[in-house]
Amino acid sequence: MSETPAPELPWPVEDFSVYGPVEEQKLGRVQHYVGRVMQRNWTSIPHVTHHDDADITEFGQRRKAWNSAHPDRKITLLPALVKASVAALQSYPQFNSSLSADGATLFRKQYFNIGFAVDVPGGLLVPVLRDCDKKGIGEIAAEIAAISAKARDKGLAMTEMSGGCFSLSSLGHIGGTGFTPIINAPEVAILGITRTRGQFIPGADGKPELRQFLPLSLSYDHRVINGADAARFVSAIAQGLEACDFES
């Protein structure tokens, strides 16, 4: 006979001023809402995170050359990752899906909307770029810049943060070697990106060769995605970066 699970322990309540001076501050409206969403997503979705390093040496060289030749149309890593994500979603459509609330029905999406996390003063917002499969990298870069500025200055409407298929969360401008991003329900996966690092590895002639590696951390819903496909998906994103067309 199965035992009834023990009730969850209540949150500890303490008077912290007993131990020293404290300052009481209410959470901002955005941060409070985001916190509730993250708690729901973390407790409702069986998360697994797959970590890998993408060798972006050649991609970085091509991007540097492009930016030098086109100073008014510089490309950052994020729009290239958006295009690489679309290519990976097209190859592995189970990642471009959502589960129903009861977990019984899988919705396979035929569109490619990519969300990306923006750090704003009041918390975290995730604007969604629509129909990324139909846009070139330059157009996506311009949209990222415009909607990021709006998110920080004015905030975003819910419609601008809805309808996503897959999300990106980048900490590369800050640092880190990997993390476990929380899936943005009802999506089934999210990619975390941290700072590129240089590493010497043996070259074709056996001599040390400096390569540039981008750490990628893919959190996925294990009800929909298995580990082998998660590994293939991250490899596909790395291949998509190598194939990225800056002219598009």
Image (cartoon, rainbow, N blue to C red):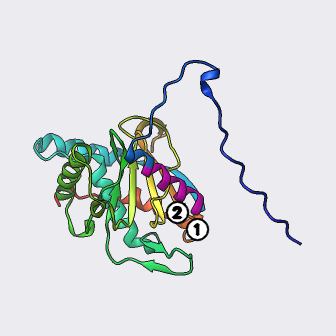
Q: Residue at x 19, y 62 (%)?
A: 136
Q: Point out which mark residue 204 bears.
A: none
Q: Position of residue 57 (x, y in %)?
A: 36, 44
Q: Nearer the viewer, residue 66 or 34?
A: 34
Instruction: State the image quarter where residue 91 is shown.
Output: bottom left
Q: Is residue 104 above or below residue 137?
A: below
Mark 2 and mark 1: span between their CA atoms? 6 Å
Q: What x and y, as percent, mark residue 92?
A: 44, 71
Which quadrant is home to the C terminus?
Answer: bottom left
Is residue 235 in view? yes
Nearer to me, 64 or 83: 83
Query: How would you classify the magenta stretch by its main secondary structure?
Result: helix
Disc 2 + disc 1, Cβ < 8 Å: yes
Residue at 35 percent of width and 37 percent of height: 173
- The local crowd at label 1, few if under 14, some if 14 to 19, many if 20 or more residues have their Cα within 10 Å, is few
Q: Secondary structure at mark 2?
A: helix
Which residue type carries mark 1? Asn
Residue 14 image offset from top left, x and y in percent: 65, 32
What residue sits 56% from the left and 80% below the top? 104
Q: Quadrant of the N terminus?
A: bottom right
**Left or right of 176: which side holds 242?**
left
Which residue occupies the extreme top position in the image? 20
Identify the residue under disc 1: 226
Tag 2: residue type?
A: Ala
Residue placed under numbered mark 2 in the picture: 230
Indicate whether 112 appears above or below 18: below
Range of magenta residues? 33-45
Question: Is the residue 142 above or below the residue 178 in the image?
Answer: below
